[in-house]
Image: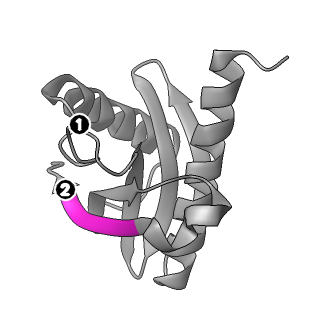
Amino acid sequence: MVSETQSKRHLGQEMEDRACAYLEREGYSLVFRNFRSRYGEIDIVAWNGPVLVFVEVRYRRRGSLVTPLESITASKRRKLRLAVRDYLGQNPVSDSVPVRVDICSLEGSPSPLHSREFSVHITKGAIEFG
């Protein structure tokens, strides 16, 4: 029997897989997935040209009260910034390398039967970092 936690974890993994496929089609080069920090998790780290990008993946079923982008609270933004700093502390890059935090929004039904009703969108620089 699959627990609700396992089901949510499986759905989260599926959405991150879809996000990764989308990002690669958009020219991102994936570096790391699920970086864990004491401040939280960074879903995806990737290069988008010369820019090191930290991607937060957000999924909502179509018709939800809030969009994936709206679901990111001030607390989540703060934790993401801290997690990015933690990643950069452990994986230093040159000061001349631009850094950005993007949001990959997924909306629709996770069911393959409703894949036409599924959308993926990237919002570049959605969370200010600096």
Main SS class of the magenta portion in the image? strand
Question: Which residue is painted at 69% across and 36% down in the image?
Answer: 10
Dot 2 or dot 1, earlier in sequence: 1
Element at label 2 = strand
Report the amino acid beneath label 2.
Answer: Ala
The amino acid marked with disc number 1 is: Ile
- Residue 6: mark in rendering: none
Mark 1 lies on residue:
72
- When the figure is inspected, residue 109 is found, relative to residue 88, above or below; the finding is below
49, 120: nearer the viewer: 120
Q: Is residue 124 magenta?
A: yes
Asked whether, in this view, residue 28 is left or right of residue 78, the answer is right
**Residue 126 at x, y percent in the picture:** 19, 56
Position of 97 relative to 76 (above/below):
below
Which residue, as the protein is rendered here, is positioned at the far right? 1
Residue 65: percent from left, percent from top: 20, 37
Residue beneath label 2, please? 126
Query: How far across and how far down the image is residue 108, in percent?
Result: 43, 56
The local crowd at label 1, few if under 14, some if 14 to 19, many if 20 or more residues have their Cα within 10 Å, is some
For the residues labelled 2 and 1, say whether their Cβ atoms are less than 8 Å apart.
Answer: yes
Q: Which residues are magenta?
A: 120-125
